Image (cartoon, rainbow, N blue to C red):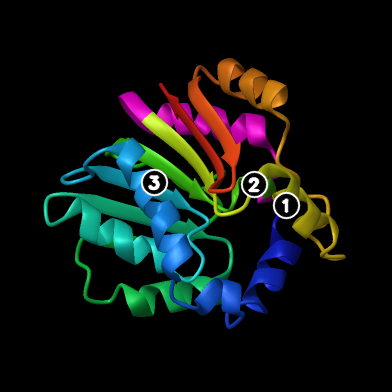
Amino acid sequence: MYREKAAFFDAQVNADWASDSYGEVELRKLDLLFSETGSLSGKTILEPGCGTGRLTEILSQKVGNKGKVVALDISPEMVSAAREKAKKNYNTDIFVAQIELFPALIEKFDLILCHQVFPHIEDKSLILSRFNDLLVPNGKVVIFHFIEFDEINNVHRKAGSVVQNDMMPENLEMELLFNNAGLTIEFIRNDENGYFLMAYK
């Protein structure tokens, strides 16, 4: 399903957007994210579409020794870079995998964090139902982008590649998708700080 996209992202592993450390503006936006999630100490987090592991590394620090981060990406090159960053983080597992095909784990997750990946998911209804299955009761799903809705879709539309049709759904469609999956949207924010959706089981 994702063969061409995996090749596309393999080729992007050294691109600035994928490999550079977060800048001051991005870190400020991440602070807003974590102010909404609350403390992540001891939590178990699933991060689909982890890329080169920039956020994975931060999540590992946030959950601490009693927490765990499971990160996935369809790109072997991205995963290789992420594993290099996380090689000293004993609370982090990183896999080359599609979330659709990732085997069920014994543990459930307190938080599923989709950072700059949700538009690239092919079957969003299937994925959200899967998220519901993987969450603990009252567990949360977060969809978070550094840029706002229109810019997300414009960037993909202008890419002229396998991601050009990867669009973020409108709010009403998102509400329907989440409700059908048994998830309740707490809020959707779309402003100068980016796109931020939080939902709970």
Membership of 86 in magenta stretch: no
10 shown above or below 44: below
Mark 2: secondary structure:
loop
Q: Residue at x 66, y 18 (%)?
A: 176
Q: Residue at x 58, y 68 (%)?
A: 75
Residue 169 appears left or right of 200:
right
Q: Disc 2 and disc 1: Cα gap in Å?
A: 6 Å
195 shown above or below 91: above
Where residue 76 sits, quadrant-wise, is bottom right
Q: As shown in the figure, which amino acid type bears the numbered disc 1?
A: Glu
Q: Look at the image and tell me whether residue 163 can be seen.
A: no
Residue 15 appears left or right of 72:
right
34 or 125: nearer the viewer: 34
Q: Which residues are magenta?
A: 120-139
Q: Position of residue 52 (x, y in %)?
A: 48, 71
Q: How many marks?
A: 3
Residue that numbered label 2 is attached to: 148
Q: Disc 2 and disc 3: Cα gap in Å?
A: 14 Å
Quarter of the picture containing the C terminus is top left
105 shown above or below 65: above
Q: Disc 1 and disc 3: Cα gap in Å?
A: 19 Å
Mark 1: secondary structure:
helix
63 or 149: nearer the viewer: 149
Residue that numbered label 3 is attached to: 32
Membership of 121 in magenta stretch: yes
Residue that numbered label 1 is attached to: 151
Q: Are marks 2 and 1 in contact (CB under 8 Å)?
A: yes
Nearest to N terminus: mark 1 or mark 3:
3
95 or 24: nearer the viewer: 24
